[in-house]
Amino acid sequence: MNCDQHLVAAHPFGTLITAETLLEQFNCLSQWEARYRQLILLAKQLPPLAENLRQPALELSGCESRVWFGYQLLADGRLHFYADSDSRIVRGLLAVLLTAIEGKSAQQLLPIDPLALFDQLALRGPLSTTRAGGLAALAQRVQEIAAQQ
């Protein structure tokens, strides 16, 4: 991270908490209920967004819960993403997404599926149709942001 640039809504996902960390945590959990509990624990580690960041321009439509999703272009060309929701389980899902995309450049994000980590963690299958649709909307937003850079 560039220490000279202040991060908007800093969080541990993608830096202190990596995809490898999540794979270790989730791979030993065979039951959906245990994975669900792990998502809630992740949600508790996602700092809530400040009220000034919970603006309509950052709110995503297509989600059953309220979701705010924003980004900051860093001086070195990497993207810092931040997010929040009024739902604990969605906050956990956001934590997984942030882990997958945080700190990557647009060139790194464009060729990948932002939701691939969900498949590696066996999280996408059991989700409700509306939650899966919300995740798809988030993935599309990540790709739109990367394409604009």
Image (tube, rainbow, N blue to C red):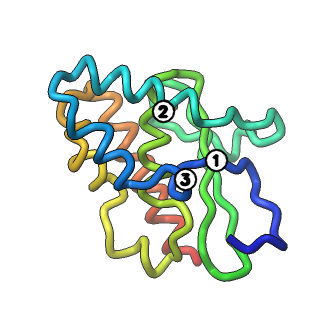
| Percent position of residue 145, x then y | 54, 65
Task: Give the crowd class for mark 3: few <14, some 14-19, many >=20 residues within 10 Å.
Answer: few
Q: Tell me the element at label 2.
A: helix
| Percent position of residue 53, x then y | 76, 42
- Numbered badge on residue 71: none
Kindly identify which residue carries mark 2: 42
- Residue placed at 59% from the left, 23% from the top? 86
Pick the quarter of the image with the C terminus: bottom right
- Residue placed at 26% from the left, 25% from the top? 128
Kindly identify which residue carries mark 3: 16
Give the amino acid type for the residue marked by disc 3 in the picture: Leu
Q: As rendered, which of 9 and 113 lies closer to the eye?
A: 9
Distance between the Cα atoms at labels 1 and 2?
11 Å
| Percent position of residue 31, x then y | 17, 22
Q: Earlier in the sequence, mark 1 or mark 3?
A: 1
Task: Give the crowd class for mark 1: few <14, some 14-19, many >=20 residues within 10 Å.
Answer: many
Q: In the rendered view, would you say 120 is above or below 125?
A: below
Task: Give the crowd class for mark 2: few <14, some 14-19, many >=20 residues within 10 Å.
Answer: many
- Residue placed at 70% from the left, 39% from the top? 56
